[in-house]
Image (tube, grey):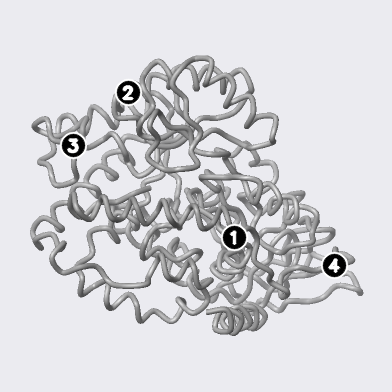
């Protein structure tokens, strides 16, 4: 995703992102000794006396014990009814709240050193939105247990028109191009297809058709010449960044978040989105970050989490504040935010389906940490904490076709869990500070997580 403050800044940001992707292509995988280790003998783990937030419905079940074995939830029940195996490692809940791990549905991973940042924030699954061999390798290492990180679903190279906006994209201009590119990505083992802004209508239709042939979902941007209506009719599975909506609902022919929006058109497009069954990943936070003032960006540079970032990532993401000359007027920034929230609320009220994604890989968007900023904005837009968490757990698993595997706390499902101090259904910010995170049955206490983060900070300090 590229975000623009003005035309000059848009060009500069896009050039920086091109350089960032090229650097990531050349850098490969960074070593992270704290996370790479041989497959361990699975232990039996018992969460004792937890308040369960299963996310199968809006409910909390107190006084529960949950048994984990071989990375799976094997037993759940009242403290008085569950027999805890003698060889179990006990995690004393003390009434704390156990919830499913989160899914960040829009990330860009550039090195394995970023993976612990997701786990530290309770994210146990990610959807990577631009992939190459690195991501196929990381995905496999995570699955076979030689690397600790979130479960990874990944696209291949983004598919764009000619000329592409970003170097490294797969260019599709003809039906033959579409068949070739989609077939190659399917054979390589990528999980879905991502489309981008510059695809022409014929090429876009050919990509969608080829993806259906190979049973791959199509997600991504709304190509400008296809438009929102065309994407909805085509059945694209998810739209990122609410793209296409400003052009479809503006009062005039402009197509920016600074436009005046037509309330009737908003309602109509929200209903059309619901009828089409197309999901949206709003990524409100990255849009907000693009609108920050120079002063706000300067303040962002003091965030302590920055020291956990790899040096090249930190330089791109937060190497310098915005230029004050590029600041939007305060009133315009307020209008842009209000427009996004108005549109999101309309989609939600219409029953259109929502996912949660942070769009890491953009300036001032931190891997792992950004999802909590996204939660805050979604609640501000009118979603309840339950509805927000639902979009990042059960609904995400359903979208990915793996609800039988994760997304709720049920017997037989993968043990991706977060233990938190307060009830997240009433205080969603509690997820920012997990007591511990379990990923595929491996428990990381907050102390262990902090040790890993400090190890990364020390490594990056030496590297940088």
SS for callout 2:
loop
Task: State the residue position of label 2.
Answer: 226
For residue 257, what is the image quadrant?
top left
Above or below — where is 456 with respect to 393?
below
Q: Residue at x 61, y 70 (%)?
A: 419
Return the mark for residue 255: 3
Residue 322 or 66: which is nearer the viewer? 322
Mark 2 or mark 1, which has the lower sequence index? Answer: 1
Is residue 427 visible in the rendered image? The answer is: no
Badge 3 or badge 1: first in the primary sequence: 1
Residue 455 percent location from the top left of the image: 63, 82
Label 3, label 1: how many angstroms apart (C-alpha)? Answer: 37 Å
10 Å neighbourhood of mark 4: few (<14), some, or many (≥20)?
many
Task: Find disc 4 in the rendering and name its residue.
Answer: 44
Q: Nearer the viewer, mark 2 or mark 1?
A: 1
Q: In this view, does 55 lie above or below 431?
A: above
Q: Which of 434 and 213 is in front in this view?
A: 213
Q: Is mark 1 on a helix, strand or loop?
A: helix
Would you name the residue on which mark 1 appears?
Answer: 27
First in sequence: mark 2 vs mark 3: 2
Q: Distance between the residues labelled 3 and 4?
A: 55 Å
**Sequence order check: which comes first, mark 3 or mark 4?**
4
Instruction: Tell which of 316 and 63 is nearer to you.
Output: 316
């Amino acid at each position: 995703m590229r975000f623009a403050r003005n035309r000059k800044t848009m060009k500069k940001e896009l050039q920086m992102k091109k350089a960032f992707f090229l650097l990531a292509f050349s850098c490969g995988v960074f070593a992270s000794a704290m996370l790479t280790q041989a497959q361990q003998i699975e232990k039996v783990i018992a969460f004792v006396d937890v308040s369960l937030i299963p996310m199968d419905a809006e409910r909390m079940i107190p006084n529960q014990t949950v048994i984990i074995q071989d990375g799976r939830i094997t037993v759940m029940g009242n403290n008085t009814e569950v027999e805890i195996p003698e060889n179990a490692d006990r995690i004393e809940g003390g009434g704390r709240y156990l919830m499913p791990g989160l899914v960040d549905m829009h990330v860009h991973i550039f090195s394995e050193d970023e993976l612990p940042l997701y786990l530290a924030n309770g994210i146990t699954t990610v959807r990577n939105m631009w992939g190459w061999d690195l991501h196929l390798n990381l995905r496999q290492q995570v699955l076979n247990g030689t690397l600790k990180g979130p479960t990874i679903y990944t696209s291949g190279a983004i598919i764009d028109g000619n000329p592409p906006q970003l170097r490294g994209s797969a260019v599709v201009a003809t039906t033959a191009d579409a068949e070739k590119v989609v077939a190659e990505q399917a054979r390589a083992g990528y999980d879905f297809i991502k489309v981008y802004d510059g695809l022409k209508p014929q090429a876009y239709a050919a990509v969608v058709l080829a993806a259906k042939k190979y049973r791959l979902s199509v997600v991504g941007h709304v190509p400008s010449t296809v438009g929102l209506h065309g994407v909805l009719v085509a059945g694209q599975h998810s739209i990122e960044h609410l793209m296409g909506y400003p052009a479809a609902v503006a009062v005039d022919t402009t197509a920016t978040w600074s436009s005046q929006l037509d309330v009737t058109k908003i309602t109509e497009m929200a209903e059309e989105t619901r009828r089409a069954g197309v999901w949206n990943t709003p990524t409100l936070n990255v849009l907000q970050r693009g609108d920050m003032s120079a002063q706000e960006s300067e303040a962002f540079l003091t965030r302590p989490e920055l020291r956990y970032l790899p040096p090249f990532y930190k330089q791109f993401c937060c190497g310098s504040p915005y230029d004050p000359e590029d600041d939007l007027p305060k009133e315009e920034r307020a209008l842009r935010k209000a427009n996004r929230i108005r549109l999101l609320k309309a989609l939600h009220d219409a029953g259109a389906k929502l996912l949660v994604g942070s769009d890491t890989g953009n300036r001032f968007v931190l891997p792992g940490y950004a999802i909590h900023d996204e939660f805050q904005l979604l609640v501000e837009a009118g979603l309840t904490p339950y509805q927000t968490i639902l979009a990042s757990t059960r609904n995400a698993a359903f979208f990915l076709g793996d609800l039988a595997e994760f997304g709720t706390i049920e017997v037989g499902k993968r043990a991706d869990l977060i233990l938190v101090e307060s009830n997240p259904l009433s205080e969603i910010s509690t997820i920012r500070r997990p007591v511990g995170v379990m990923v595929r049955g491996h428990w990381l206490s907050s102390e262990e997580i902090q040790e890993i983060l400090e190890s990364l900070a020390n490594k990056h300090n030496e590297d940088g």
